[in-house]
Amino acid sequence: MKSAVETLNPTRVKLTVEVPFEELKPSLDAAYKKIGQQVTIPGFRKGKVPAMVIDQRVGREAVLLEAVNDALPALYLQGLQDNNLTPLGQPELDLDEVEDGVPLNFSAELDVKPEITLPVYDGLEAEVDDISVGDDEVEEQIESLRERFGTLTPVERPAADGDFVTIDLSAANDGEPIEEAQATGMSYQVGRGTMLEGLDEALAGMAADDEKTFPSTLVGGEFRDQVVDVTVKVTAVKEQELPQLDDEFAQTASEFDSMDELRADLRDRATRSARIEQASSARDVVLEQVLAMVEIPLPEAVVAEELKSRRDSIVEQLSYAGLTEADYLESEGQSEEEFAAELEKRVRDAMASQFLLDEIANAEALGVDESELTQHLLRRAQQAGTSPEEYIQHAMQHNQVPELVAEVRRGKALAHIVENAVVKDKSGSVVELKTLQPDGTYADPAELQAAEPDAPDEQRADTAADVVTTPEYTTFDDNADKA
């Protein structure tokens, strides 16, 4: 078999293949066998019909077409391998007329990964915000913890902000009750503003057994976005009593003996969380710098296909929430044009990132071992909300394992460029990323070296790769974007 490639543009090629007729013999034999099992010819058992008889009764042309259809996928794949092509999407095939005894000729136009000339990416300099954990943030967490351990006491007075009320709600349109807009025994904290528009204002001054009707707009159902009459009845008012902030509370709410220890732990947790956010920021800044240093042409057909896939996924997610795209855009204060532009930018950035990280992974000869793939599968299963066994089975059935391996390599490539960058905060302090753990603590470099003294840095820093990578950057074929 002979093949040649013509470059049509940086992301599209034309593959031309010529196959000597004798190389089609295995496919011809298979075609005769298949047809022989399908036809019924007197005097011959199924599967035992001679080729000459099949030619007479069915026709040599039908056998040739069956053989070519059987051979084409493997021939196309061999052409890709012989020319080191990585296809993106389905090809446009053009098959010459099939003639008996004549070489088979066909061509395929297809989108391929672009060739990328990598810039110098080691030692990049980047700046991120300082880590700042203030007293207000710690006290906010303490107050939240305090509310969790608060008690509710019934009171015989009108409801006030912060009180918890038990209410019945009933919506009606022109005096007719709306069946899907009826609820009883609901608990709600006055002033929270998380339910119907106008509810907090209506509850002001209401006591147990009071009833009031007010206009409001429904957010779902048949009367979505319509103003209807809502009747609220208060069946109970309860006042929240919060515990005193003392050592006894610390012992009840945590494993610590004193409030000082509890505050110190909450500050430490907030600091570790801030380190993770800082690492994510460093990842974004460094990757943006590398992307800005190289020109990566993108196949427009693949971009359009991914845009449509993501748009459909977003619409589906919104429909599950009982919202339309217009509802979402209004809540976000975005126009259709702004939303479309933002989505396209995300798709293009993610696609360019994938191509870049694949090339860096090749340049750095990054591999993936079984434990790394297993950890990635576990994370993916958790993201998908399914069991690891189900996710792995689905991945194997749909031949997704190679792409999952590629995702791990991209993650390691991203970790490599981020960890080898010089990242400083705005105060000028160097941000340590190589030893940062997923929980926001730092590993002891000496312990890492002692554990695997002969392992290269990228293998000893797998946990750091977990910190600085996300699916958005490791693959663009992912419809799990937030709406």
Image (tube, rainbow, N blue to C red):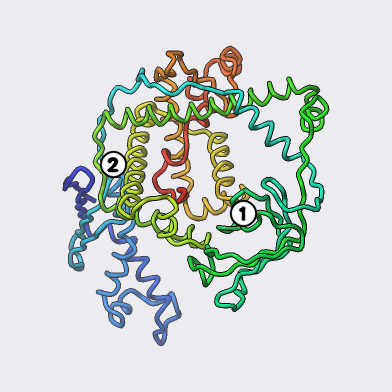
Q: Name the residue tied to disc 2.
A: 84
Coordinates of residue 40 in the picture (x, y in percent): 41, 84
Q: Which of 171 and 449 is in front in this view?
A: 171
Q: Count the labels in the image.
A: 2
Question: Earlier along the polypeptide chain: callout 2 or callout 1?
Answer: 2
| Disc 2 from disc 1: Cα separation | 66 Å
Numbered label attached to residue 259: none
Kindly indicate whether the residue at mark 1 contacts the one at mark 2 (C-beta within 8 angstroms): no
x and y, in percent, of residue 291 in the image = 31, 32
Which is more toward the observer, 227 or 88?
227
The residue that appears at 61% across and 23% down in the rendered structure is 135
In this rendering, would 108 be left or right of 478? Answer: left
Looking at the rendered image, the disc whose residue lies closer to the viewer, 2 or 1, is 1
**Secondary structure under badge 1?**
helix
For this orientation, the residue located farthest to the bottom is: 42
Q: In the rendered view, would you say 420 is above or below 212?
A: above
User: With 49 as the anchor, is 201 left or right in this view?
Assistant: right
Which residue is at 79% across, 46% downward?
152
Q: How crowded is mark 1: few (under 14 residues within 10 Å), some or many (20 or more)?
A: some
- Please say if 59 is above or below 149: below
The amino acid type found where label 2 is placed reads: Asn
Eyeballing the image, is 330 above or below 50? above
Residue 58 on image: x %, y %: 30, 80
| Element assignment for label 2 | loop
Mark number, residue 200: 1
